[in-house]
Image (cartoon, coloured by chain):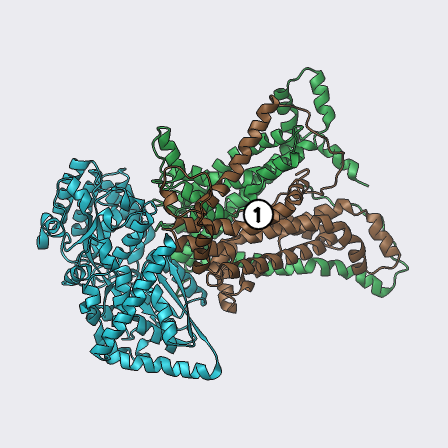
Chain colours: A cyan, B green, C brown
Amino acid sequence: MNTNRRTRFAAAVSGLAALSLLVSACSGPAAGETEEPNDTNTTTGENGGTGEEITLTVTTFGTMGLDDLYAQYEEANPGIKIEATNIDTGGNALTDWQTKQASGAGLPDVQAVEEGWLSKVMTVSDSFTDLREYGADDISGNWVDWKVAQATDAEGRIIGYGTDIGPQGLCFNGSLLEEAGLASDREGFAELLGGDDATWENFFDVGRQYHEATGKSWYDQSGFVWNAMVNQLEEGYYTADGELNIVDNQELKDRWTLLANAAADGLSDNQTQWDWGGGQAFVDGSFAVAVCPGWMLGVIKGQIEAGGGDASTGWDFADVFPGGPANWGGTFLTVPTTSEHPAEAAALAEWLTAAEQQVAAFQAAGTFPSNLEAQQDPGVTGQSELTATFNDAPVGEILGSRAEGVHAQFKGPDDSVIQEQVFGAAVKEIDAGETDAEASWNTAVELLDTIVG
Amino acid sequence: MHTTTAQSPPTRLTWRQRLSRADVRYSPYAYVAPFFILFAVVGLFPLGYTFVVALNDWNLLTGPGEWVGLANFQRELTDKLFWNSIFNTFSIFLLSAIPQLIAATAIAAILDQNLRAKTFWRLSVIVPYVVTPVAVTLIFGNMFGERYGLINNVLSTIGMDPVMWKSETLPSHLAIAAMVNWRWTGYNALILLAAMQAVPRELYESAAIDGAGAVKRFFAITIPSIRPTMIFVVITATIGGLQIFTEPKLFDASASIPGGPGREYQTTVLYLWDLAFNRQEFGRASAVAWLLFLIIVAIGLINFQLSRSIAGSGPGRQKRRRKEKP
Amino acid sequence: MTTTAPPTAATAPVRRRRRRSGAGIQTGPRWFVYAMLGALFVGSTYPLYWSFVMGSSDKTALVEMFPPLLPGSQFWANVSEVFATVPFWKSLGNSMIVSSVITISVVFFSTLAGYAFAKLRFRGREGLMVFVIATLAVPTQLGIIPLFMLMKEFGWTGSLGAVIVPTLVTAFGVFFMRQYLVDVIPDELVEAARVDGASMIRTFLNVGLPAARPAMAILGLFTFMTAWTDYLWPLLVVPQNPTLQVALSQLQSAKYVDYSIVLAGAVLATLPLLVLFVIAGKQLVSGIMAGAVKG
C-alpha cells in the first residue's frame, strides 16, 4: 500500500514538474533563473572534465515536499548527487543542527532552518554562507518581503532562501460536523465561526455545542491551538525589542484562560503531538477540527493515509481563522560555511526555492509558497492530489487569502524552548484535565523561571 | 570483591644478566602502562575537565563565557528539574532492580531443577539480551502507546481504563522499568543460577534429613548462599541503572520535551543531555555530570561496605577460596 | 555512554566441583515447572515476534485492536523502505568496525595489564591495583562534554575514531583479567619459564596468553555487546556517519507515522546478533554463568 502510494505520488509529481517546466518556459525566465542554469552548467562542465561527482547533503524536517525534486535536480545536473535526510519534527531538527553545529562537523551542504528557531541560528549567523555572494541580492524580490527580512542578519547578510510560509486556516471534518447537526460545508463552517470576525471565544463556543451534541472532542490537542493563539499576536513571548514578555502579559494570560477552560470542558482530545496514534485519530472521528498552516496539510494527509483513511474520511479546509490572520512556521534553506561546495549548495538551495519548485512542493505537501510568483501559480491555486484529500477545497487560494495581513512576529532566542518546554508542559496539564487555568499558568511561569530565567 | 594478590615464592636474582634484570624490572610497567595512559587521557582527563567547564558559563554554540565559580552547582542543587531527574532515575532504578532481582532469583530456581532440554530453556531466557536497548525501546515504546498501543488495547478489552504510560509519572516509570527488566532479568537469572549450582549439595541433604521442606530449604540455604552474587548483581545494575538514557530518550518518538511532557520520566543523564544539547547550557550540564558522578561514587562506596559486611556471611565461600590457594 | 550494566564477573571461572545435575530442592509439580518455563519462553520471545509480525504487515495492522497472529507479506517492502531512509548497511559496517576495534583493544590491553597485576612483581603494584579497583565504580561515561569538545578540537567528529577512542580501555577489563589469571596460572609456571631463561614477553606469550584465552573470550563477548549497544556517545559524535543504533533511532524519528517500517528496522537490526546467538548461544550462556561463578 505504501509503495503504491509512493509510485502514484512520484508519477503525479513528475507529471506536474514537467508541466511546470513547460509553464516556466512559456512565461520566460525570471531574473534568478537565467543565472542558475549557468551556475550548475559550469559546475557540470568542470566535473565532466574530471569525471568527479559532487555529493550534496541536504537535511530537512517534517513534510517539506522536496523528496521528488532531488531526483529531478540530479537529472538536470549530471555530476551532482543529492543525499537527503529528513527528520520528523522541527524540534528534533533543531537538536540535530545544534549538536552538529557545536561539534564542528557533520552539517549538511544545505540545512533547512525553521522560523521558530531561526533566532537561535542568528546567534551564530556567521557560520552560514552569505548567499549574496551567490546572487541573493538579485533575486530577493522574488519572496514576500518579511520572509527575506527574517533571513537577513544584523550585518545585512542573507543566510537563507525561504521555502514556505505558514498562514493558518482550519481543517475540519465535514462528516462529523454534519452528524452533530452543524454547518458542514466550507463556507457554512467559516460563517459559523464568524467569518472575518472569527474569535477564539466563538471557536470554543461552537466546540462546546459540538461536544454537547456528540460527546466527542472538538480539536486534537491544545498545543498547536496555543501555538496559533500566540503566533498571531502582535508580540508573542518577546516584545519587538527582544524583552521577555510573558509574566505580566495580560493578553497572553487571557488567551491561556480561554484555552484552559476549553480543555477543561472536554474540547481537547489530548492526542500526542505529531503522533495522533499513528494517524488513527484522524480517521476514527476522535475530533473534528485542527489548526492548519499550509505545511500541516501535507502532514495531515500523511496521517490520514497512515490511519487507513482517504478523501472519504471527510476532512476539508476552511478559509477562516479565529482571532484573525496567523502564521506558524515556514522554513529557510541555508548553506553552512562548513560546506565544501558552497556554490553548488547555494545553487541547489536557490533552485529548490524557486517558483516552480515551490509549486511542486506545495502540491506534494501543502507548503504554501513564500515566492510571490508561485503564490499566483495555477499549480498552487488549482486542484491537485492534496486538494483531493481535503474535499477538493481550493487549498492554495484559501491559504493565499489566509496569508493576507500576516505579519512576522519577533522571535527571541529562546522562543522554541518556551514554546516546547515551558508551555508544552502546561498544555499537557490542561489537556490531561489535571489543573485549571490559573494553576497551569503558574506551572508555565515557574518553568519559565527554571528553564529560561 | 577479592583484592589480595597471590604470594610468589622468593625469587633468585643473583645469576641473572643485567639485561634480563632490566627486563624483569621494567616489563611489568610496560604491560600496565598502556592501560593507565589511555585511561588517563580518555577517562580521567575528561572527568577533571568536566569540572573546569562546570565553573564557566559555557554555551554549546558560542563557547566559554564568564567564569562563574560554583554558581552552576548552586543553580542545579536548587533546580526543581534537577531533583526531578534524580527522583526519576532512582524511581526507575528501584522499580527495575528490585522486581528484577526477585524474578531473576525465581527463574534461576526454576532453571536449577532437573530439566529436560536444559540448554534450550537457558537460551530462551537470554534471547532479550541480544536485542539492543534502542530496538527494545522502539518495540516497547509502541506497545505502550497511550491511545492505540497493544497493552492498553488489551487492558480495555478486559474492562480496565487505559494507562497513561507516556505522560504520568508512575506508569511511565513502570513502562521503562519493564523494558530494562525484559532485557536483563534472564541474564541475571543465569548468573544467579551459576551461584546456586555452586551451593554444596550436602547442605540440602542434611537439611532435608532435619525435615526442612523445599521452600524452607530455599530460604534457609539457597538464598544465603547466593547472597554475595545477588549483591554483585545489584552493584552492577546500580552503575548502569543510574546512567539510564536510551530508554527514556526514545520512549516517545515525537515528544517535544525529552522525558515526557511534564518530564515525568526525564532521568538525570537525559536531563544532562537536554541541558547540554538542547538548551545549550554546557556549564550547567557539566555541573550535573559531576553531581551525578558524586552520587554514583557515594552509592558505590555504600555498596562496597555493604557487600563487605554481608559477603562474609555466605556459607562456604571463604573455605572454598582458601582451598584454591597454592 | 551506555545504559547497560557491565557484564558481571568477579573471579576466575575455574570449575571447582563437578556440576550437579539439578538442585537440592524441587519446587512444585513438574507440569508447573514446565508451565512456568513455557510462560518465560513466550515472555522473552513474543515482543520480538510481535515486531516481526508488525514489521511484515502494512501500517494498518497496527491500528487493529489485536495484532494478527501470523506475519504479513510486507516485510521486504518495509525493509526496502528502511534501506531508503537510513544507511543501514553502512551503519551495520560501522558498528562492526567500532565494536571489533574496541573489543580487540580492550581485550589486549586488559590481558596485558591483568597478567602483570596477577603474576608479576613490581614496585607500586598494590597501589596501582587499588587505583584500578577504585575506578571500577567511576562512571567515566560522564565525561562526555569534554570528550565532545576534544573530538571537535581534533576534528574527529563524524569519524569512527571518535566513537572508538574513549572506550579503548576499561578498568573493568583489567580487573576481570587479573582476577582470572591470579587463580588460573600457578606461580611456579611463571617461575619455571623464567628459570629456563625466557624473556618476560616470551613468558607472557607462552604461559600467560594461553591460560588467559577462555577469559579473553568472555571479556571479548561482553565488550563487544557493550560497544554494539552503545547509543549516547555515537549519537553525539557520528550522527552523520551513524552506527547501527543511531541509524535505528534516526529511522524512528524519520518514520514515526509508519511504525511498521520502524519495527521492520528494529527486527532487521536485531538479526546480526540473533544469528550470532543461534550460532554461539551456548557459549554465551556458559560465558555469563562462568563469568559470575562466585560474584
Expressed as whole percent of the image width and height from the top left, the position of residue B241 reads 51, 43
Q: Nearer the viewer, residue A441 or C255?
A: C255
Q: Could you tell whether B313 is left or right of C77 in the image?
A: right
Q: Which residue is found at the position 39% from the left and 49% from the top?
A: B258
The front one of A218 and A186 is A186
Q: Can residue B322 be seen in this view?
A: yes
Q: Please tell me in which quadrant of the rendered image residue B317 appears.
A: top right
* Residue C270 x/y as whole percent: 53, 49
Which residue is label 1 attached to?
C274
Position in image of residue A449 (x %, y %): 30, 50
Residue C169 picture quarter = bottom right
- In depth, the one of A76 and C232 nearer the eye is A76
Q: In which quarter of the image is residue A206?
A: top left
Q: Report whether B38 appears left or right of A224.
A: right
The residue at the far right in this view is B15
Residue B63, compared with residue A304, is above or below; it is below
Dot 1: element: helix
Tell which subunit mark 1 falls on: C
Would residue A274 be visible to someone looking at this image? no
Q: Quadrant of the C terminus of chain A?
A: bottom left
Q: Is residue B283 found left or right of A170 in the rendered image?
A: right
Tell me the amino acid under the disc marked 1.
Leu
Crowdedness near tag 1: few (<14), some (14–19) or many (≥20) residues, C-alpha within 10 Å: some
